[in-house]
Image (tube, rainbow, N blue to C red):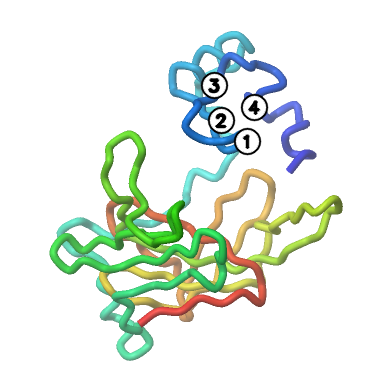
């Protein structure tokens, strides 16, 4: 990651080159109270002289989306599409213990997690006050590397790992690939075809090799 940040082609904003782009709040303890804002980032970009024009460094093709008039229900996969009205990530994320419950009325997955005080409850957006919800969930297994001093690097450049895709209350096994620093991560079904997401928000859940999750 540091190699990519140090490339001449990588424009980046952080607390070391423009502290005005970030601010801290008093509602949480440091380091969990650091935030940024759209205007703050734009101001830092202007100060640094970065261009806001697309430079063509990344792949143009990324996610594929199903047409809103013909959503992807995963029915084309038959029995390989498993019922998944509840996706439990607590085994992979023992601190936040997050899980997702599917709502058939609006066809969204709602996120809940461990809350301070020792109870579980809805994961609420601090700005809107609404529970986080998603049209698509992608679980992505990655290789972990110990880089010393208690830090782990999650290897997101790979062509050998797998995961799961959940949408519309169903789930299928997938594989994924990402090559090159600016390459897009793409997800494929077991037929080798790139999956189609449904319109809306997508949460990508990175988990380490050997970590577990469940669905039902």
Please state if 208 lies on the left or on the right of 108 as rendered.
right
User: Between disc 3 and disc 1, whose residue precedes?
Assistant: 3
Residues marked 2 and 1 touching at CB (< 8 Å): yes
Q: Earlier in the sequence, mark 4 or mark 2?
A: 4
User: How far across and down, in percent of the image, does residue 132 sit?
Assistant: 33, 51
Cβ atoms under marks 3 and 4 closer than 8 Å: no
Q: CA distance from mark 2 to mark 1?
A: 6 Å
According to the picture, the residue beneath numbered tag 3 turns out to be 23
Q: Residue at x 45, y 75 (%)?
A: 189
The vertical placement of 214 against 54, above or below, is below
* Quarter location, residue 48: top right
* Image coords of residue 163 (percent x, y): 53, 72
Q: Secondary structure at mark 3?
A: strand
Q: Residues within 10 Å of mark 4 (few under 14, many from 20)?
A: few
Q: Secondary structure at mark 4?
A: loop
Which residue is tagged 4?
A: 12
Extreme-front residue of the structure? 117
- Which of label 4 and label 2 is nearer to you? 2
Mark 3: few, some, or many residues within 10 Å (few <14, many ≥20)?
A: few
Pick the front one: 27 or 52: 27
Residue plotted at (40% across, 63% down): 137
In space, the residues marked 1 and 4 are separated at their CA atoms by 20 Å
Q: Which residue sits furthest bottom?
A: 79
For the residues labelled 3 and 1, the Cα–Cα distance comes to 11 Å
Residue placed under numbered mark 2 in the picture:
34
Return the disc, 3 or 2, that comes first in the chain's sequence.
3
Badge 1 crowding class, 10 Å Cα cut-off, few under 14, some 14 to 19, many 20 or more, is few
Which label was assigned to residue 6?
Answer: none
Closest to the observer: 173 or 101?
A: 101
Q: Are marks 3 and 2 in contact (CB under 8 Å)?
A: yes
């Amino acid at each position: 990651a540091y190699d990519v940040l140090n490339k001449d082609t990588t424009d980046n904003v952080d607390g070391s080159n423009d502290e005005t782009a970030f601010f801290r709040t008093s509602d949480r303890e440091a380091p969990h109270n650091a935030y940024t804002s759209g205007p703050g980032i734009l101001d830092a970009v202007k100060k640094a002289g970065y261009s806001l024009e697309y430079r063509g460094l990344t792949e143009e093709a990324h996610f594929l989306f199903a047409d809103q008039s013909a959503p992807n229900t995963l029915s084309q996969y038959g029995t390989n599409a498993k019922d998944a009205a509840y996706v439990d990530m607590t085994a992979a994320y023992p601190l936040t213990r997050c899980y997702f419950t599917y709502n058939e009325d609006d066809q969204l997955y709602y996120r809940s997690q461990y809350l301070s005080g020792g109870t579980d409850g809805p994961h609420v957006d601090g700005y809107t006050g609404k529970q986080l919800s998603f049209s698509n969930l992608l679980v992505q297994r990655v290789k972990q590397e110990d880089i010393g001093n208690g830090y782990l690097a999650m290897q997101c450049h790979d062509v050998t790992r797998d995961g799961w895709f959940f949408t519309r209350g169903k789930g299928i096994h997938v594989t994924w690939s990402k090559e090159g620093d600016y390459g897009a991560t793409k997800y494929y079904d077991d037929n080798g075809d790139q999956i189609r997401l449904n319109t809306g928000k997508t949460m990508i859940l990175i988990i380490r090799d050997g970590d577990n999750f469940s669905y039902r």
